Image (cartoon, rainbow, N blue to C red):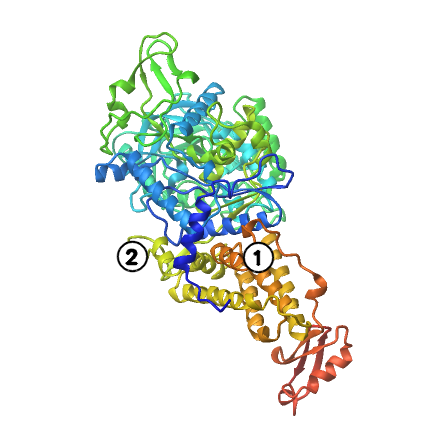
């Protein structure tokens, strides 16, 4: 067969059509004796089209899935759609189309692109979260949580995005703005909403982070630890002077309470409305409004005096009560005692407003400390506790509060219950009914799913669109049959993505969310892949959901995924791709110009997968040329496969490089995932093939051609299927055994030793393994390339590392 030119425009459609015609091609085996491997990329939102930034995530997962198939695993590699959400509803309003129509159209477009990219998904397990057969189970789970007290309703001051016209969870507020609208400041709005009691699992979510160490990125685990925010301390009741009302404060440093010189309330604290009026009330409202626009960093501390005082229960001292913007209603009790001598925030605030500063902790060594002194030390000026180390004082003072009925040791968390109510249409209806006689009643399981009504007007403003559908709203109470009203809010779409990966294991089940036996086989997920931006959203919610499902008896695993990988972004011209910047390159245009294999290969080669990579046309062209090189080598070698010959030095060199490359790529897949170095090693191997090609025997050409295809198969499946067929071999390639590394064949004939002068490379030589240090030193000093750098100079010392290097130090 003569050398042929690689033409992606004919090869890729041919194989794409063949793969699509076999719906079982990428399906896992039933009742398999093979070890299982569940690899999963986070499901996408069907926004309309893939661009090259999207395909990196899928290319990583697909390469791993294909490698594991070739290593003899039973692989589950599914795909679906996170299909509910505001973009569909907003697009429907803008374009006067139904959200379902817009969403289904986008799913078809993106599914076509996924197929065109050649990703190895088992489409029979496809899940779309906007379909009733999926969101029915969202509703079922909600009712189970309601029955266990994990779902409840209350009035609260909540985050509101005026552009989305809906509530946002705390995790969806980024730097004071909506996570979907980076330039829209979030406002505070008081509403009655549904919450899921994620705080009931706060301790376990934090404790089980230890189980994820080594499998999840340290950065993600640190972000979750900080977000959960466990603090051990003491709750203490100060008494309002003149009214007797209690103000409970939370402090992690009760050992400093004798230094408390004021009590500070959060602007939203329930007592503020009672004790603050007039100009001060306006100032407090301004704090609340400003809070929504402020990010997580430091803000200028602002406060107002309430004209009230509170009594410290430890010493009976009256201290002023203030309201300040840096005290958070969601942390602790929403009230703090300010100890300016031993807390930087309190010091800054009290200095600004002229509030007393009183030291009550001294360093262990008895020296005088500059204020604020925030370390632990020895308690001073604190009555009977003076002289105690801080740790002992905290224990004894907490016990004293409990014994005297004005406080107790306490643990508090930064994480708050998950507000899931959304005042929009395109989401899961909350399956609850409001009855004047019976209260809030869940919809019976037999009536699930509660379907989204079709007779609604979408405006994006005001109350939930569901409230405008009388047939939807007006229903009989399931308990008493009297007229009642359905809940008209829909669920946060993060509910949909909290458990979708379980549904993949049993996607057609109409009787239950899934069969627990199937989950027991596949879970936990062996490798989960997605962006770090989900660290405190989806990844915390999904961990909670797993523990909740375990506790209602559906599953036995504690965590959804054993390993997590967070890939870097694909950027263009130094910036994240966005339509506003005009730097988006569509996946279709990339495939038209270069082919899917080129896109996959470049994105896996251009940078380590956890780092950002900059897409360049020159880089893509380089990957395309390399694919062409491989194609030309194999196609022109096929006719020589049966040519007899005696293996010579060229054969040994090529086989040595082949087995070194097998070892390198295998190790990268099994450990660090540095596909960029794997592909670089393969490029070196191809260079060696070209250098030795004319002297290779037919048997060697056959072996290296076949192994070349197998090694490249996870990265460039279209190229490899075509070459495999051209060599007359039965496919598919990804079901063939992965090449086995032979350490004997990989062994070098000798060691390559580099020669340095003052640490700079000046020469090298190949020597027998185990050559003595003395011989290596003489060899280096006699090297013609080294001599000019040592002649006329004093040799200070010679450093010899056998089989590695000789470094001559001169001056």
Q: Nearer the viewer, mark 2 or mark 1?
A: 1
Of labels 2 and 1, earlier in sequence is: 2
Say whether residue 178 is visible.
no
Q: Which mark is residue 710?
A: 1
At 45% from the left and 60% from the top, the residue drawn is 602
Name the one closer to the observer, 746 or 139: 746
- Where 222 sits versus 620, above or below? above
Indicate whether 647 appears above or below 66.
Answer: below
- Disc 2 marks which residue? 582
Q: Quadrant of the C terminus?
A: bottom right
Question: What residue is rendered at 47% in x and 52% in y?
Answer: 59
* Image-based side of 362 in relation to 167, left or right: right
Q: Residue 646: percent from the left, percent from the top? A: 69, 72
Tell me if mark 1 has few (under 14), some (14-19) or many (20+) residues whose alpha carbon lies within 10 angstroms of its own: many
Residue 83 position in % (x across, y down) = 37, 37
Estimate the x, y position of residue 347 in percent, counting from the top left.
44, 44
In this view, 374 is above or below 611: above
Give me the C-alpha separation between circle 2 and circle 1: 39 Å
- Mark 2: secondary structure: loop
Q: Position of residue 350 (x, y in %)?
A: 41, 42
> Dot 2: within a 10 Å radius of its alpha carbon, few (fewer than 14), some, or many (20 or more) residues?
few
Total numbered labels placed on residues in the image = 2
Can residue 568 be seen at all in this image of the molecule? yes
Element type at mark 1:
helix
What residue is rendered at 58% in x and 67% in y?
Answer: 685
Front-most of residues 187 and 331: 187
Q: Does residue 214 sit above or below 242 in this rendering?
A: below
């Amino acid at each position: 067969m003569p050398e042929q030119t690689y033409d992606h425009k004919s090869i890729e459609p041919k194989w794409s059509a063949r793969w699509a015609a076999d719906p079982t091609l990428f399906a896992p085996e039933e009742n398999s004796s093979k070890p299982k491997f569940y690899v999963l990329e986070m499901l996408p939102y069907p926004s309309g089209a893939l661009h090259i930034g999207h395909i990196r995530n899928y290319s990583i997962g697909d390469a791993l899935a294909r490698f594991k198939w070739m290593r003899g695993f039973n692989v589950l590699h599914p795909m679906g759609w996170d299909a509910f959400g505001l973009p569909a509803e907003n697009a429907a309003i803008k374009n006067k189309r139904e959200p379902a129509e817009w969403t289904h159209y986008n799913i078809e477009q993106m599914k076509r692109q996924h197929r065109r990219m050649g990703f190895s998904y088992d489409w029979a397990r496809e899940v779309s979260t906007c379909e009733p057969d999926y969101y029915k189970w969202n509703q079922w789970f909600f009712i189970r949580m309601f029955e266990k007290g994990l779902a409840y309703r209350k009035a609260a001051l909540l985050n509101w995005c005026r552009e989305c016209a809906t509530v946002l969870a705390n995790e969806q507020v980024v730097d004071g703005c909506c996570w979907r609208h980076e330039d829209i400041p979030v406002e505070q709005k008081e509403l009655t909403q549904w919450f899921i009691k994620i705080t009931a699992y706060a301790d376990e979510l934090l404790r089980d982070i230890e189980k994820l160490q080594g499998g999840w990125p340290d950065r993600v685990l640190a972000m979750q630890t900080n977000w959960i925010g466990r603090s051990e301390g003491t709750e203490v009741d100060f008494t309002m002077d003149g009214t007797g009302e209690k103000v409970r404060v939370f402090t992690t440093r009760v050992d400093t309470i004798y230094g408390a010189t004021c009590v500070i309330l959060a602007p939203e604290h329930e007592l503020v409305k009672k004790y603050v009026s007039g100009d001060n009330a306006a100032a407090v409202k301004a704090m609340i409004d400003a809070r929504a626009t402020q990010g997580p960093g430091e803000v200028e501390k602002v406060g107002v005096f309430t004209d009230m005082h509170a009594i410290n229960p430890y010493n009976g001292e009256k201290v002023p009560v203030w309201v300040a913007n840096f005290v958070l209603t969601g942390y602790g009790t929403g009230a703090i005692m300010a100890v300016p001598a031993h807390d930087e925030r309190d010091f800054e605030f009290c200095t600004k407003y002229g509030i007393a500063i009183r030291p009550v902790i001294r360093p262990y060594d008895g020296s005088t400390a500059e204020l604020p002194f925030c370390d632990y030390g020895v308690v001073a000026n604190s009555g009977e506790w003076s002289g105690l180390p801080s740790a002992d004082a905290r224990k004894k003072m907490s016990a004293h509060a409990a014994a005297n009925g004005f406080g107790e040791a306490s643990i508090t968390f930064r994480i708050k219950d998950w507000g899931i109510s959304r005042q929009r249409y395109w989401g899961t209806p909350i399956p609850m009914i409001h009855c004047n006689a019976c209260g809030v009643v869940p919809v019976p399981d037999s009536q699930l799913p509660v379907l989204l009504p079709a007779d609604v007007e979408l405006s994006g403003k005001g109350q939930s669109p569901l409230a405008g559908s009388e047939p939807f709203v007006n229903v009989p109470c399931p308990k008493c049959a009297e007229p009642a009203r359905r809940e008209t809010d829909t669920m946060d779409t993060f509910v949909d993505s909290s458990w979708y990966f379980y549904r993949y294991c049993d996607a057609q089940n109409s009787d239950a969310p899934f069969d627990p036996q199937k989950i027991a086989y596949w879970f936990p997920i062996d490798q989960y892949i997605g962006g770090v931006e989900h660290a405190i959203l989806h990844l915390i919610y999904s961990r909670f959901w797993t523990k909740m499902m375990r506790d209602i008896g559906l599953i036995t695993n504690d965590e959804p995924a054993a390993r997590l990988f967070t890939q870097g972004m694909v950027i263009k011209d130094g910036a994240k791709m966005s339509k506003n910047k005009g730097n988006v390159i569509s996946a279709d245009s990339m495939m038209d110009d270069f082919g899917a294999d080129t896109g996959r290969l470049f994105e896996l080669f251009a940078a380590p997968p956890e780092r950002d990579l900059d897409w360049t046309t020159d880089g893509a062209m380089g990957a395309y040329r390399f694919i062409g090189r491989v194609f030309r080598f194999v196609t022109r070698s096929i006719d020589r496969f049966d040519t007899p010959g005696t293996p010579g030095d060229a054969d040994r060199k090529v086989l040595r490089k082949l087995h070194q490359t097998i070892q390198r790529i295998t190790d990268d897949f099994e450990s660090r995932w540095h596909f960029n170095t794997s592909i670089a090693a393969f490029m070196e191997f191809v260079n060696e093939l070209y250098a030795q090609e004319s002297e290779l025997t037919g048997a060697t050409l056959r072996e290296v051609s076949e192994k070349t295809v197998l090694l490249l198969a996870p990265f460039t499946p279209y190229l490899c299927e075509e070459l495999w067929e051209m060599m007359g071999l039965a496919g598919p390639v990804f079901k063939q055994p992965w090449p086995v590394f032979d350490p004997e064949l990989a062994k070098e004939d000798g060691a390559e030793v580099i020669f340095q002068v003052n640490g700079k490379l000046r020469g090298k030589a190949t020597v027998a393994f185990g050559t003595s240090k003395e011989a290596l030193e003489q060899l280096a000093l006699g090297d013609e390339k080294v001599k000019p750098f040592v002649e006329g100079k004093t040799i200070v010392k010679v450093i010899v590392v056998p089989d590695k290097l000789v470094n001559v130090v001169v001056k």
